[in-house]
Image (spheres, rainbow, N blue to C red):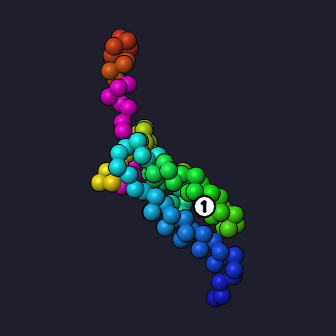
Amino acid sequence: MQVGPDVTDCEQAEDTLRVQVDAAQHCSKDDDCTLFDYGYPIQCLTSVAKTDITVLRLEYRNYQQSCAFRVYYDCPTGGMERQAVCRNNLCTVALMSNEFLEEKTLDYLGLTPR
């Protein structure tokens, strides 16, 4: 089976995007990071350096233009809130639950379910 130029262009755009995202995960503190949760071909729950976000958005646009048949999906988080954090000098994503605060708020308001 022979691969056409469209498929090759798409694969190259995916590879370039992945490499740039990996290179953009540097940080020294939490505030250096932001979410870059675009789904395929990037892993779900991705965080990158804020200083690199514009270049990455442009590269993602290039990927979209190069790949006529893209995969679309949402990155599920359930009832969790995503937060970009810096761990070991790499931007990553922490999932935080809001349930504890919701229960405390309802209890404070006297609306605790019985």
Residue in the foreground of this view, choosing between 101 and 8:
8
Find residue 102 and report its image quarter.
top left
Taking the image as shown, residue 103 lies to the left or right of residue 24, namely left
Q: Position of residue 63 (x, y in %)?
A: 63, 64
* Quadrant where the image shows the C terminus: top left
Is the stretch drawn in magenta largely helix, strand or loop? strand
Q: Residue at x 59, y 74 (%)?
A: 12
Residue at the limit of the structure toward the left, as seen here: 88
Q: Is residue 110 above or below residue 89?
A: above
Q: Residue at x 57, y 57 (%)?
A: 55
Q: Position of residue 46 (x, y in %)?
A: 45, 53
* Quadrant where the image shows the N terminus: bottom right
Taking the image as shown, residue 48 lies to the left or right of residue 87, namely right
Q: Residue at x 60, y 69 (%)?
A: 13
Q: Residue at x 62, y 57 (%)?
A: 58
Magenta-highlighted residues = 90-102
Residue at the limit of the structure toward the top, as seen here: 110
Residue in the foreground of this view, choosing between 15 and 41:
15
Find residue 60 and report its image quarter.
bottom right
Residue 24 sits inside the magenta stretch: no
Find residue 112 and report its image quarter.
top left
Residue at the limit of the structure toward the bottom, as seen here: 1
Q: Position of residue 92 (x, y in %)?
A: 38, 51
Badge 1 crowding class, 10 Å Cα cut-off, few under 14, some 14 to 19, many 20 or more, is some
Q: Which residue is mark 1?
A: 59
Q: Is residue 50 above or below residue 110?
A: below
Does the rendering let one see residue 107?
Answer: yes
Does the rendering let one see residue 76?
Answer: no
Q: Which amino acid lies under the numbered mark 1 shown in the image of this protein? A: Glu
